[in-house]
Amino acid sequence: MAKEWNTMDTDAFRAEVRAFFQQHYPEHLRYPKRRLRWNEIREWTLKLAAHGWLAPSWPARHGGMGLAPNKLIVFIEEQERHGVARAPDMGITMVGPLLIQHGTDAQRAHYLPRILSCQDIWCQGYSEPNSGSDLASLRTEAVADGDDFIVNGQKIWTTLAQDATHIFLLVRTDKAAKKQEGISFLLADMKSPGVTVRPIRNIAGAEDFCEVFLDNVRVPRANIVGELNKGWTIAKALLGFERIFLGSPKQSQYALSRVEEAAARLGLLEDPVFADRYTQLALDVADLGTLYARFVEQVKRGEALGPEVSMLKVFATETYSRLANVLVEIAGASGATAGDVETDDGAIDVLTTFYNARPATIYGGSNEIQRNILASTVLQLPS
């Protein structure tokens, strides 16, 4: 199957993927205003799994589509174009590829089929109170005890942990080592005694994020991925891959179209001052698309993404935030109204974009930290 996909003409592959999404993806779930919960997206995810399309980037020998980088980018672009909601996909995008590259044969045999069947749903245990963007300062500790580790600590901003069956954790296994060292990568069952999940309600009323408390949680030593005390290397690899998708221009393109739509309904596009401002935003979005394409070409060539990918994350999220601010501003007195704002020419949803833009500059590593990375590793400025 992998050879068939990768030898297809790119336009033919795009047409097949697009047709599948148009035919099978539920219309009422397109472009959702919030992150969907597992019970809402479950049936679609199972349909993808049954079709063999749940893990497009995994090698075919492990049950994936085996897409080459250029085909994978097309697949993702078509998902974004059609407004396909993101399922709880940490198992597909992070745990699976991690185990394929760094896991043991026993780990792959146990976990990969369960991810593909949606029997196991994963969440990410990275951030902690006071250890968010400075992730290496984490304090959750795993102490060896016979064939187990005993884990104590707290994770926060854990996306959809209330729907997860398993969590992958960064834990400190050597307190005497430097903070980037002495960290290990551990897999844990959310049903283990001592795991407590508390959802966090955000300003929009959704509960996308959770706190996860770990109180004397026993995790088998066999659940460590890679070498003991070498988890930081794995974590950095996963975050680098994540940032190219956080830098996709689709979010800003969608927000720009909402600004244009609202401005047209309110008659603002004839105002030369606003038209100039809109043009500047449109050019920013176009530049973002060009920058994204540059990194996409690296992925297509099979090249590793370097620290400069942080530039993409910063540009994408700050462009999106500017667009969200403008959308609220042009709504005037109705800019703080939740839900649809009625105008003479129809309804405009203002606050959803604004709410989504607020955390965008923080998740995936705050933009302040990303700028430090660019300054020290790309520009090689003195610290």
Image (cartoon, rainbow, N blue to C red):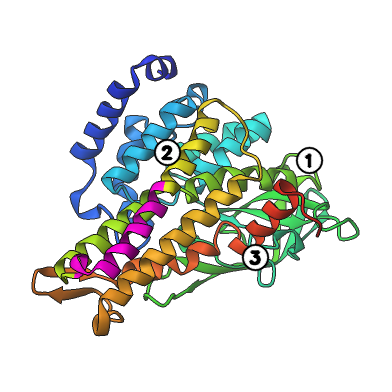
Disc number placed over residue 227 in the picture, else none: 1
Callout 2 amino acid: Ser
Disc number placed over residue 132 in the picture, else none: 3
> Does residue 211 appear in this view?
yes
Q: Quadrant of residue 48?
A: top left
Image position of 320 (left or right of 273)? right
User: How packed is label 2: few (under 14 Cα within 10 Å), some, or many (20 or more)?
Assistant: some
For the residue labelled by badge 2, is the local secondary structure a helix, a strand or a loop?
loop
Pick the residue in front: 333 or 186. 333
Give the foreground label among 1 and 3. Answer: 3
Residue extent of the magenta highlight: 268-286
Disc number placed over residue 117 in the picture, else none: 2
| Between discs 3 and 2, the one toward the N terminus | 2
User: How packed is label 1: few (under 14 Cα within 10 Å), some, or many (20 or more)?
Assistant: few
Going 45% across and 44% down the picture, which residue do you hit?
A: 119
Relative image position of residue 301 (x, y in whole percent):
54, 25
